[in-house]
Image: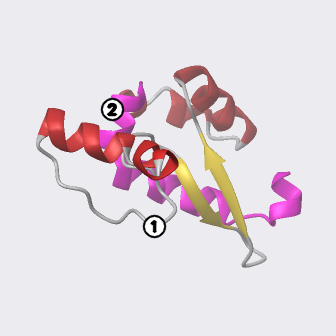
Amino acid sequence: FDCCVASLANIGSNYLVGNKEAKRWGTAHANIVPYQAFKCSDDEYIVVGIGNDAQFRRLCELLNVEHVANDTRFSNNKDRVNNRESLILILNETLRQSTVSEWL
């Protein structure tokens, strides 16, 4: 039972602190962006989970989209969450250009 309650920590906090009701995010995370599965050119998926700003900059370098790391809409996680749709569109287009094994 403790594990079930612990797994709801983010959802509970969002509701109690921000009065935000939970919604379905699929493989994505409500509070961290990017943090989800992306389809690659081989129709296989790769999961990207970025936990801090330095990791985001490194991801952008690895994907050859350094300009995205310098975009003020994506400066920090709060900005990335607020601009989720724009960022996910860019990452979807970028990751779709190669296979999972090529990215790895």
Task: Examine the rendered structure and indicate whether residue 65 appears above or below residue 75.
Answer: below
Instruction: Give the residue number, with chain letter if any, for mark 2.
Output: 79
Q: Is residue 60 magenta?
A: no
Task: Report x, y in % for residue 67.
Answer: 54, 33
Pointer 1 residue: 26
Residue 73 seen in render: no
**Residue 41 x, y percent position in the rendering:** 74, 73
Tell me the amino acid under the disc marked 2: Asp
Magenta: main secondary structure equals: helix
**x then y, percent, for residue 69:** 53, 30
The residue located at (39%, 62%) in the rendering is: 25
Residue located 74% across and 38% down the image: 62
Magenta residues span 76-104
Between disc 1 and disc 2, whose residue precedes?
1
Three-letter code, disc 1: Gly
Whether pointer 1 and pointer 2 mark residues with C-beta atoms closer than 8 Å, the reply is no
Could you tell me which residue is drawn at 35 percent across and 55 percent down? 85
Q: Secondary structure at mark 2?
A: helix
Does residue 51 appear anywhere in the picture? yes
